[in-house]
Image (cartoon, rainbow, N blue to C red):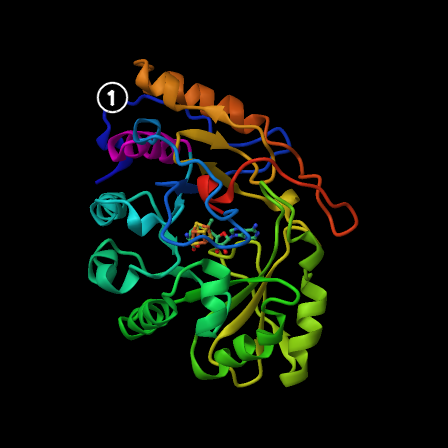
Amino acid sequence: MTASGADTIKLPEIKLVDKYNRRLDYLRISVTDRCNMQCIYCMTHGKIQKLPGREILSYEEIFRLALIFIKLGISKIRVTGGEPLVRKGVCDFLIKLGRLEELSDLSITTNGILLKEKIGKIKSAGIKRLNISLDTLKKDKFKKITGSDAFNEVWSSIMAAHDSGFYPIKLNVVVLRGINDDELLDFAGLTFSYPFHIRFIEYMPIGTSHLTSRQLFAPEIKNIISSIGHLNPVQRNRFDGPAQRFKFENAKGEIGFIRPISEHFCSSCNRLRLTASGNLKTCLLSDTETDLKTPLRNGCSDDKLAEIILRTVYDKPFEHPLSSNCAGIIPGHMSKIGG
Ligand code: SAM
Ligand code: SF4
C-alpha cells in the first residue's frame, strides 16, 4: 500500500522543513502511555496519572496522521510508548504500517517483557531493527530499577529476537551513578559475544530531576569502558540516529553513546514525536506541543491537518536548554512522550 492509498489527500508539495532548514523525516509515535514497568528515571513510581482511554488516539486516527506525515516527507517511523506492546492490537497496527511502501524504516522501542510472545507478528510487519531497554544484567537490580521482576523474560526476549534474525538489536542503557555504573564493563563486554549495539544513554531530567546528581556523561563512560579495549569509530550510515558509534577490535557488536546533555545533537535533529494523546512535539526536551487530536476529531480535512503540522514544524526550537553545566527540569513525562 502507498500513502497515496488515502487518495483524497491532495497535499501541497511542501515538505517538513523548519526555519533553520532542518529536514524532518523521522517520526516517533507513542501508541500508549501505559506501561508494565515503572523505571525510576521514567516514572515516579505510580504518581503519574494515566490518560483516560478516550484521550488516547485510536489506531485509525494514528494511521490517518501517519499517512499525512508520510505525504509530507516522513520516511522513518519508530513505534514506542509507554510500552507499545501492552496496547491491544499493536501487532496488527505494525503490520498495517509495515505495508506502506514510502517507509524506508519501521522499528519499535520496547522494554522486552512481551516481545518474545509477539516476535513472529513483529517480524511479519517487516521490522528488522529493535531497540530494547535493559539497564542492568542483574535480576535483583532489575527489579529495583524497573519495579518489575521480569529480568528473565526480557533476557529471553532478547535471545529470541537474536535467534529470529533481528538486526541490529540495540540495547538501551540509561547510565546512573551508583545504580548501574558498576556494570558498564559487563555491558561493553556483551559486544564480544553478541552482535548487539549497546547504547549508553545520558539521563534526561524529564518531569522530575531526582536523579540529576547521578547523571554520568558519555566521556566518563567511554573512559571507563576503554579499559577493556580500544574503541574505533564506526562509519555512519543512513539509519544512524544521534548515537556516536564505536566498536572494539574483534567485537561482534558496537557501542553507541547518546548524548542529549553533554553534546546535544539539536543542530542535526530530524525527529518529530506524536504523543499517545495526539500532540505533536517537535523537541523532546521542550514543553511545547501542538494538539492534533482536537482538529482531527472535529472533522478537519487532511489538507488542514497538514497545514497545522507544517506550521508547527517550521517553528521547531533551535535547541534545548540543558547541558552538563546547566541543570534543569523539563516538564512532561517520558512515558507519555515515548523517548
Ligand atoms: N517502554 C519502552 C522502553 O522502555 O523501551 C519504550 C518507551 S521508553 C520512554 C523509550 C526509551 O526512553 C527507553 O530506552 C528508556 O530507557 C528511555 N528513557 C526513559 N526515561 C528516560 C530519561 N529520563 N532519560 C533518558 N532516557 C530515558
Ligand atoms: Fe515503561 Fe519504558 Fe518508561 Fe520503563 S522506560 S517505565 S519500560 S515506558
- Name the residue nearer the viewer: 179 or 224: 179
Snapshot quadrant of residue 111: bottom left
Q: Position of residue 300 (x, y in %)?
A: 33, 15
Q: Position of residue 233 (x, y in %)?
A: 62, 71
What amino acid is at disc 1? Thr
Q: Residue at point 29% right, 29% down?
A: 61
Q: Position of residue 98 (x, y in %)?
A: 26, 48
| Magenta stretch in the rendered image | 58-72
Q: Circle 1: is it few (<14), some (14-19), or many (20+) Cα within 10 Å?
A: few
The residue indicated by pointer 1 is 8
User: Magenta stretch containing residue 13, yes or no?
Assistant: no
Height in image: 213 above or below 266? Answer: below
Q: Residue at point 49% right, 78% down?
A: 191
Residue at the farthest right position: 325
Snapshot quadrant of residue 53: top left
Q: Is residue 169 left or right of residue 62?
A: right
User: Magenta stretch containing residue 71, yes or no?
Assistant: yes
Q: How many marks?
A: 1
Height in image: 121 above or below 181? Answer: above
Q: Is residue 141 left or right of residue 264?
A: left
Height in image: 326 above or below 147? Answer: above
Classify mark 1: helix, strand or loop.
loop
- Name the residue nearer the viewer: 8 or 223: 223
Q: Residue at point 44% right, 73% down?
A: 139
- Name the residue nearer the viewer: 16 or 59: 59
